[in-house]
Amino acid sequence: MATKKVKKVVKSESSSAVKPVAKKKVVAKKKSVSKAVSTKKVNSSAKSKELEAKKNSYVIVDYPVENETIAGNNYVLRIGASTDGYVEVSFNSGEWLPCRFASGYWWFDWNYFKSGNVTIAARIVGSDGKVVKLSDIRKCKVS
């Protein structure tokens, strides 16, 4: 407990002189234990919901299939994913490119690709900007 000194002025009946008298006033500190406990409960339940969402999340490159040979000037990738964010795709560990959502799948219009072996990865990004789930690497060949 903290103490605080307070000066009090007392007049004596016999004289008109003023005497200062020191008096201690006790100030109690408040503890908000209930708020701290309830905040911890909310944070832990939010984290458990987040972990559960990550557990149930999935992302997979449907097409092209593993070791498929792609010919032509364009190809449309189909990616299956849970709907807890948005999907991006990367070729040969390059930059992540946004996909579009339609008919229950995520799609990427792939144009002007070079011949050779290609690796494709997809990921789900949550609304907070954090990666929720990363797909397995899909290998294919472009001729």
Image: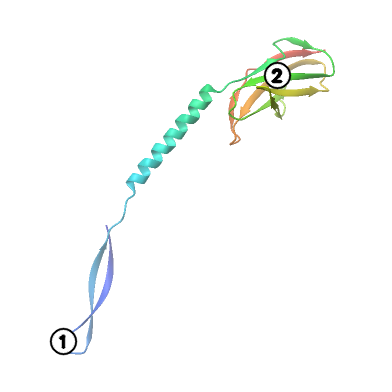
Q: Which quarter shows the N terminus?
A: bottom left
Local SS, label 1: loop
**Left or right for 65, reference 142:** left
From this view, report whether residue 82 is shown above or below residue 12.
above
| The C terminus: image quadrant | top right
135 or 62: which is nearer to us?
A: 62
| Crowd tier of the residue under label 2, counting other residues whose Cα lies within 10 Å: few below 14, some 14–19, many 20 or above | many
Residue 44, given in percent of the width and then of the height, sits at 42, 34
Q: Secondary structure at mark 2?
A: strand
Marks 2 and 1 in Cβ contact (< 8 Å):
no
Using the numbered discs, state the Cα–Cα distance from disc 2 to disc 1 in whole angstroms.
98 Å
Q: For the point 28% across and 58% down, which residue is it? A: 28
- Percent of width and height locating residue 58: 58, 21
Work out which residue is located at the far bottom of the displayed protein and give it.
15
Q: Which residue is mark 2?
A: 78
63 left or right of 52 in image: right
Amino acid of disc 2 = Arg
Image side of residue 96 versus residue 23, left or right: right
- Amino acid of disc 1: Glu
State the image coordinates of residue 47 (x, y, percent, origin top left): 46, 32
Mark 1 burial class by Cα count in 10 Å: few <14, some 14-19, many 20+ = few
The residue to which callout 1 is attached is: 13
Mark 2 and mark 1 lie on one chain; the one further toward the N terminus is 1
